[in-house]
Image (spheres, rainbow, N blue to C red):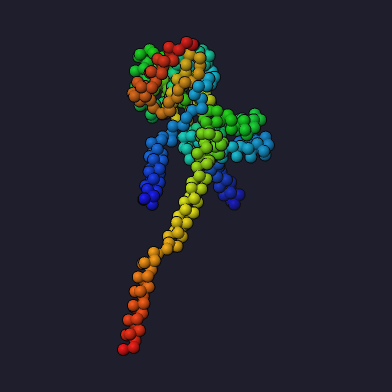
Protein backbone atom coordinates (compact mmCIF):
# COMPACT_ATOMS: atom_id res chain seq x y z
CA UNK A 1 0.00 0.00 0.00
CA UNK A 2 2.78 2.36 0.95
CA UNK A 3 4.65 1.58 -2.24
CA UNK A 4 1.54 2.22 -4.30
CA UNK A 5 1.00 5.59 -2.63
CA UNK A 6 4.61 6.45 -3.26
CA UNK A 7 4.32 5.49 -6.91
CA UNK A 8 1.18 7.58 -7.39
CA UNK A 9 2.87 10.58 -5.82
CA UNK A 10 5.89 10.03 -8.02
CA UNK A 11 3.72 10.01 -11.11
CA UNK A 12 2.08 13.26 -10.10
CA UNK A 13 5.41 14.94 -9.50
CA UNK A 14 6.45 14.59 -13.13
CA UNK A 15 4.19 17.47 -14.08
CA UNK A 16 6.41 19.78 -12.10
CA UNK A 17 9.42 18.84 -14.15
CA UNK A 18 7.86 19.18 -17.55
CA UNK A 19 8.30 22.95 -17.63
CA UNK A 20 12.03 22.77 -17.06
CA UNK A 21 14.31 22.33 -20.03
CA UNK A 22 16.49 19.30 -19.80
CA UNK A 23 19.96 19.80 -21.16
CA UNK A 24 22.67 17.22 -21.40
CA UNK A 25 26.24 18.44 -21.35
CA UNK A 26 29.49 16.70 -22.27
CA UNK A 27 31.47 18.15 -19.38
CA UNK A 28 30.90 19.96 -16.10
CA UNK A 29 32.75 22.99 -17.51
CA UNK A 30 30.28 23.14 -20.37
CA UNK A 31 27.37 23.12 -17.97
CA UNK A 32 28.93 25.88 -15.90
CA UNK A 33 29.62 27.97 -18.99
CA UNK A 34 25.97 27.52 -19.98
CA UNK A 35 24.82 28.70 -16.58
CA UNK A 36 27.11 31.73 -16.60
CA UNK A 37 26.24 32.71 -20.17
CA UNK A 38 22.49 32.46 -19.77
CA UNK A 39 22.73 34.62 -16.66
CA UNK A 40 24.79 37.27 -18.47
CA UNK A 41 22.63 37.61 -21.55
CA UNK A 42 19.62 39.89 -21.51
CA UNK A 43 16.26 38.80 -22.81
CA UNK A 44 15.45 41.59 -25.27
CA UNK A 45 11.70 41.15 -25.06
CA UNK A 46 11.43 41.36 -21.28
CA UNK A 47 14.32 43.69 -20.80
CA UNK A 48 14.96 43.32 -17.12
CA UNK A 49 15.38 39.58 -17.15
CA UNK A 50 18.25 37.39 -18.20
CA UNK A 51 17.58 34.67 -20.72
CA UNK A 52 18.00 32.20 -17.87
CA UNK A 53 15.12 33.83 -15.96
CA UNK A 54 12.77 34.46 -18.82
CA UNK A 55 10.34 32.12 -20.44
CA UNK A 56 9.70 34.35 -23.44
CA UNK A 57 9.98 32.57 -26.78
CA UNK A 58 13.06 34.58 -27.72
CA UNK A 59 14.79 33.69 -24.45
CA UNK A 60 14.10 30.02 -25.12
CA UNK A 61 15.58 30.34 -28.61
CA UNK A 62 18.66 32.14 -27.31
CA UNK A 63 19.16 29.47 -24.63
CA UNK A 64 18.96 26.83 -27.31
CA UNK A 65 21.51 28.77 -29.37
CA UNK A 66 23.92 29.04 -26.42
CA UNK A 67 23.51 25.34 -25.68
CA UNK A 68 24.12 24.28 -29.27
CA UNK A 69 27.17 26.47 -29.62
CA UNK A 70 28.66 25.10 -26.40
CA UNK A 71 28.09 21.56 -27.62
CA UNK A 72 29.88 22.52 -30.83
CA UNK A 73 32.86 23.43 -28.69
CA UNK A 74 32.54 27.21 -29.00
CA UNK A 75 34.13 29.26 -26.24
CA UNK A 76 32.34 31.71 -23.97
CA UNK A 77 33.87 34.67 -25.80
CA UNK A 78 32.83 33.31 -29.17
CA UNK A 79 29.25 33.00 -27.98
CA UNK A 80 29.24 36.48 -26.44
CA UNK A 81 30.60 37.88 -29.71
CA UNK A 82 27.95 36.00 -31.67
CA UNK A 83 25.22 37.59 -29.57
CA UNK A 84 26.62 41.15 -29.63
CA UNK A 85 27.09 40.97 -33.41
CA UNK A 86 23.36 40.38 -33.71
CA UNK A 87 21.82 42.24 -30.80
CA UNK A 88 24.48 44.82 -29.84
CA UNK A 89 26.02 45.47 -26.44
CA UNK A 90 22.57 45.79 -24.95
CA UNK A 91 22.27 42.01 -24.88
CA UNK A 92 25.03 41.89 -22.26
CA UNK A 93 24.21 42.55 -18.63
CA UNK A 94 27.86 43.43 -18.21
CA UNK A 95 28.54 45.78 -21.11
CA UNK A 96 32.15 46.35 -22.21
CA UNK A 97 33.84 49.69 -21.57
CA UNK A 98 33.61 51.68 -24.81
CA UNK A 99 33.11 55.26 -25.93
CA UNK A 100 29.39 54.54 -26.19
CA UNK A 101 29.07 52.99 -22.73
CA UNK A 102 31.51 55.42 -21.10
CA UNK A 103 28.78 57.49 -19.41
CA UNK A 104 27.33 54.31 -17.94
CA UNK A 105 30.59 53.35 -16.31
CA UNK A 106 32.07 56.75 -15.42
CA UNK A 107 28.78 58.52 -14.60
CA UNK A 108 28.39 57.19 -11.05
CA UNK A 109 32.03 57.95 -10.19
CA UNK A 110 31.67 61.50 -11.55
CA UNK A 111 28.56 62.05 -9.43
CA UNK A 112 30.31 60.68 -6.34
CA UNK A 113 33.26 63.02 -6.84
CA UNK A 114 30.91 65.93 -7.51
CA UNK A 115 29.15 65.19 -4.23
CA UNK A 116 32.40 65.04 -2.31
CA UNK A 117 33.61 68.34 -3.79
CA UNK A 118 30.34 70.00 -2.86
CA UNK A 119 30.48 68.57 0.64
CA UNK A 120 33.96 70.01 1.17
CA UNK A 121 32.98 73.39 -0.29
CA UNK A 122 29.87 73.72 1.85
CA UNK A 123 31.52 72.67 5.11
CA UNK A 124 34.35 75.14 4.47
CA UNK A 125 31.97 77.99 3.89
CA UNK A 126 30.05 77.19 7.06
CA UNK A 127 33.26 77.29 9.08
CA UNK A 128 34.14 80.66 7.53
CA UNK A 129 30.76 82.05 8.49
CA UNK A 130 31.30 81.05 12.10
CA UNK A 131 34.70 82.71 12.23
CA UNK A 132 33.59 86.02 10.74
CA UNK A 133 34.77 88.99 12.81
CA UNK A 134 32.18 91.29 14.20
CA UNK A 135 33.08 94.95 13.47
CA UNK A 136 34.68 96.83 16.37
CA UNK A 137 32.00 99.45 16.73
CA UNK A 138 29.32 96.87 17.09
CA UNK A 139 31.40 94.91 19.55
CA UNK A 140 31.85 97.99 21.66
CA UNK A 141 28.14 98.68 21.66
CA UNK A 142 27.46 95.11 22.68
CA UNK A 143 29.94 95.35 25.53
CA UNK A 144 28.42 98.60 26.75
CA UNK A 145 24.98 97.01 26.70
CA UNK A 146 26.20 94.06 28.70
CA UNK A 147 27.86 96.34 31.24
CA UNK A 148 24.66 98.34 31.58
CA UNK A 149 22.60 95.22 32.18
CA UNK A 150 25.09 93.97 34.70
CA UNK A 151 24.98 97.33 36.51
CA UNK A 152 21.19 97.29 36.61
CA UNK A 153 21.15 93.75 37.94
CA UNK A 154 23.63 94.64 40.66
CA UNK A 155 21.56 97.66 41.60
CA UNK A 156 18.48 95.51 41.85
CA UNK A 157 20.21 93.08 44.15
CA UNK A 158 21.34 95.84 46.47
CA UNK A 159 17.92 97.41 46.90
CA UNK B 1 23.66 84.68 -5.49
CA UNK B 2 25.39 81.35 -6.11
CA UNK B 3 23.46 79.97 -3.17
CA UNK B 4 20.24 80.36 -5.15
CA UNK B 5 21.63 79.52 -8.58
CA UNK B 6 23.20 76.22 -7.56
CA UNK B 7 19.96 74.36 -6.71
CA UNK B 8 18.30 75.84 -9.78
CA UNK B 9 21.14 74.62 -11.99
CA UNK B 10 20.97 71.16 -10.39
CA UNK B 11 17.23 71.07 -10.89
CA UNK B 12 17.55 71.99 -14.56
CA UNK B 13 20.21 69.32 -15.16
CA UNK B 14 18.07 66.69 -13.46
CA UNK B 15 14.95 67.77 -15.29
CA UNK B 16 16.72 67.55 -18.65
CA UNK B 17 17.99 64.04 -17.89
CA UNK B 18 14.58 62.87 -16.69
CA UNK B 19 12.83 64.41 -19.68
CA UNK B 20 15.23 62.68 -22.05
CA UNK B 21 14.69 59.43 -20.17
CA UNK B 22 10.94 59.78 -20.64
CA UNK B 23 11.27 60.37 -24.35
CA UNK B 24 13.59 57.45 -25.01
CA UNK B 25 11.92 54.25 -26.05
CA UNK B 26 13.56 51.35 -24.21
CA UNK B 27 12.32 49.04 -26.95
CA UNK B 28 14.41 50.92 -29.51
CA UNK B 29 17.71 49.13 -29.41
CA UNK B 30 20.13 50.29 -32.10
CA UNK B 31 20.92 47.41 -34.41
CA UNK B 32 24.60 46.61 -34.82
CA UNK B 33 23.76 45.24 -38.28
CA UNK B 34 23.26 48.62 -39.98
CA UNK B 35 25.72 49.07 -42.86
CA UNK B 36 26.76 45.42 -42.66
CA UNK B 37 25.91 42.67 -45.15
CA UNK B 38 22.50 41.12 -44.53
CA UNK B 39 22.99 37.71 -42.90
CA UNK B 40 22.66 34.73 -45.24
CA UNK B 41 19.61 32.56 -45.19
CA UNK B 42 18.14 29.70 -47.17
CA UNK B 43 14.53 29.23 -46.17
CA UNK B 44 11.51 27.46 -47.65
CA UNK B 45 8.90 29.58 -49.39
CA UNK B 46 5.51 29.69 -47.65
CA UNK B 47 3.43 28.80 -50.72
CA UNK B 48 5.90 26.28 -52.14
CA UNK B 49 7.82 24.71 -49.25
CA UNK B 50 9.91 22.66 -51.67
CA UNK B 51 11.42 25.89 -53.02
CA UNK B 52 14.08 27.72 -51.00
CA UNK B 53 14.95 31.36 -51.25
CA UNK B 54 18.47 32.58 -50.45
CA UNK B 55 19.77 36.06 -49.87
CA UNK B 56 21.94 35.76 -52.97
CA UNK B 57 18.91 35.52 -55.22
CA UNK B 58 17.96 39.05 -54.10
CA UNK B 59 21.28 40.78 -54.71
CA UNK B 60 21.18 43.49 -57.36
CA UNK B 61 17.86 44.84 -56.18
CA UNK B 62 16.65 46.91 -53.25
CA UNK B 63 14.43 44.82 -50.99
CA UNK B 64 12.60 44.99 -47.71
CA UNK B 65 12.65 42.20 -45.19
CA UNK B 66 9.45 42.43 -43.22
CA UNK B 67 9.32 40.15 -40.17
CA UNK B 68 5.76 39.11 -39.44
CA UNK B 69 3.67 36.36 -37.85
CA UNK B 70 -0.01 35.55 -37.63
CA UNK B 71 0.25 35.49 -33.82
CA UNK B 72 1.60 39.04 -33.77
CA UNK B 73 -1.02 41.66 -32.94
CA UNK B 74 0.81 44.76 -34.08
CA UNK B 75 1.60 43.10 -37.43
CA UNK B 76 -2.10 43.52 -38.13
CA UNK B 77 -1.75 47.26 -37.53
CA UNK B 78 1.03 47.76 -40.06
CA UNK B 79 -0.35 45.32 -42.62
CA UNK B 80 -2.54 47.81 -44.58
CA UNK B 81 0.44 50.12 -44.91
CA UNK B 82 2.45 47.36 -46.55
CA UNK B 83 -0.52 46.50 -48.77
CA UNK B 84 -0.44 50.13 -49.93
CA UNK B 85 3.31 49.95 -50.56
CA UNK B 86 2.92 46.74 -52.55
CA UNK B 87 0.41 48.47 -54.85
CA UNK B 88 3.02 51.07 -55.75
CA UNK B 89 5.34 48.31 -57.04
CA UNK B 90 8.28 50.31 -55.78
CA UNK B 91 10.32 47.63 -54.10
CA UNK B 92 10.60 43.87 -53.57
CA UNK B 93 9.02 42.97 -50.24
CA UNK B 94 10.19 39.74 -48.66
CA UNK B 95 8.10 38.54 -45.74
CA UNK B 96 9.94 36.63 -43.04
CA UNK B 97 7.20 34.55 -41.48
CA UNK B 98 8.70 34.23 -38.03
CA UNK B 99 7.98 31.20 -35.83
CA UNK B 100 4.53 30.70 -37.25
CA UNK B 101 2.25 27.84 -38.26
CA UNK B 102 2.26 27.75 -42.07
CA UNK B 103 -1.51 27.11 -42.14
CA UNK B 104 -2.21 30.10 -39.87
CA UNK B 105 0.13 32.25 -41.92
CA UNK B 106 -1.60 31.38 -45.19
CA UNK B 107 -5.00 32.05 -43.71
CA UNK B 108 -3.80 35.39 -42.37
CA UNK B 109 -2.62 36.47 -45.82
CA UNK B 110 -5.81 35.26 -47.48
CA UNK B 111 -7.83 37.32 -45.03
CA UNK B 112 -5.82 40.55 -44.89
CA UNK B 113 -4.17 40.60 -48.29
CA UNK B 114 -0.67 39.60 -49.30
CA UNK B 115 1.77 42.48 -49.83
CA UNK B 116 4.80 40.18 -49.99
CA UNK B 117 6.44 39.25 -53.27
CA UNK B 118 7.52 36.16 -51.43
CA UNK B 119 7.20 34.93 -47.84
CA UNK B 120 9.78 32.61 -46.35
CA UNK B 121 9.31 30.46 -43.26
CA UNK B 122 11.60 30.75 -40.28
CA UNK B 123 9.95 28.03 -38.25
CA UNK B 124 12.57 27.82 -35.51
CA UNK B 125 13.47 31.49 -35.40
CA UNK B 126 17.11 30.90 -36.38
CA UNK B 127 17.21 33.45 -39.18
CA UNK B 128 15.45 35.74 -36.71
CA UNK B 129 18.42 35.40 -34.34
CA UNK B 130 20.84 36.13 -37.21
CA UNK B 131 18.97 39.34 -37.93
CA UNK B 132 18.77 40.26 -34.24
CA UNK B 133 14.97 40.12 -34.27
CA UNK B 134 13.51 40.69 -30.80
CA UNK B 135 10.20 42.44 -31.39
CA UNK B 136 7.97 41.44 -34.27
CA UNK B 137 7.14 43.25 -36.53
CA UNK B 138 10.50 44.47 -37.72
CA UNK B 139 11.46 45.89 -41.11
CA UNK B 140 14.91 45.89 -42.70
CA UNK B 141 15.84 47.87 -45.80
CA UNK B 142 18.57 46.16 -47.84
CA UNK B 143 20.37 47.86 -50.73
CA UNK B 144 21.44 46.47 -54.11
CA UNK B 145 24.72 45.18 -52.71
CA UNK B 146 22.95 43.24 -49.99
CA UNK B 147 23.88 45.69 -47.21
CA UNK B 148 21.34 46.45 -44.45
CA UNK B 149 20.80 50.20 -44.56
CA UNK B 150 17.95 50.69 -42.11
CA UNK B 151 15.97 48.83 -39.49
CA UNK B 152 12.60 49.68 -38.03
CA UNK B 153 11.48 47.88 -34.88
CA UNK B 154 7.77 47.64 -34.15
CA UNK B 155 4.82 48.42 -36.42
CA UNK B 156 5.47 50.85 -39.30
CA UNK B 157 2.90 53.64 -39.34
CA UNK B 158 1.87 55.86 -42.26
CA UNK B 159 4.36 58.52 -41.26
CA UNK B 160 7.30 56.09 -40.97
CA UNK B 161 6.43 54.80 -44.41
CA UNK B 162 5.98 58.19 -46.11
CA UNK B 163 8.78 60.08 -44.41
CA UNK B 164 11.46 57.46 -43.84
CA UNK B 165 11.03 54.21 -45.73
CA UNK B 166 9.81 55.37 -49.15
CA UNK B 167 12.37 58.21 -49.51
CA UNK B 168 15.12 55.80 -48.45
CA UNK B 169 13.98 53.12 -50.91
CA UNK B 170 13.91 55.69 -53.72
CA UNK B 171 17.38 56.87 -52.80
CA UNK B 172 18.76 53.32 -52.68
CA UNK B 173 17.15 52.45 -55.99
CA UNK B 174 18.97 55.37 -57.58
CA UNK B 175 22.31 54.04 -56.35
CA UNK B 176 24.40 52.01 -58.75
CA UNK B 177 24.32 48.36 -57.72
Residue B18 located left or right of residue A115: left
Question: Within the image, what quadrant is residue B165 found in?
Answer: top left
Residue A88 position within the rendered picture, expressed as x and y whole percent measured from the top left: 52, 31
Residue B90 lies, with reference to residue A17, above or below; the image says: above
Residue A98 lies, with reference to residue B128, above or below; the image says: below
Residue A29 located left or right of residue B84: right
Q: Can residue A85 be seen from the camera position used here?
A: yes
Identify which residue is drawn at 48% across, 48% down. Answer: A114
Identify which residue is drawn at 53% across, 34% down. Answer: A99
Identify which residue is drawn at 60% across, 49% down. Answer: A3
| Extreme-bottom residue of the structure | A159
Identify which residue is drawn at 38% across, 68% down. Answer: A139
Residue B6 lies, with reference to residue A27, above or below; the image says: below
Question: Within the image, what quadrant is residue B81 found in?
Answer: top left
Residue A6 position within the rendered picture, expressed as x and y whole percent measured from the top left: 58, 49
Residue B112 position within the rendered picture, expressed as x and y whole percent measured from the top left: 35, 21
Residue B108 lies, with reference to residue A128, above or below; the image says: above
Q: Can residue B79 be seen from the camera position used here?
A: no
Amino acid sequence: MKTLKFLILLMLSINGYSAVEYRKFDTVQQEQAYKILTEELRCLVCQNQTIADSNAALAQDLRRQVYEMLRQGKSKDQITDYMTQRYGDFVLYNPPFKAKTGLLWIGPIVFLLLGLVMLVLFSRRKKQLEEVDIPDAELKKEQEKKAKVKGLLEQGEQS
Amino acid sequence: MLKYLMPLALFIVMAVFLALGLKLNPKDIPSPLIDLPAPDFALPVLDQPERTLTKHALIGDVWLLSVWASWCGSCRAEHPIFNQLAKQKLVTIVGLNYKDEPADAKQWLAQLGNPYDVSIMDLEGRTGIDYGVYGVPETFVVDKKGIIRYKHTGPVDVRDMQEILIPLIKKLKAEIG
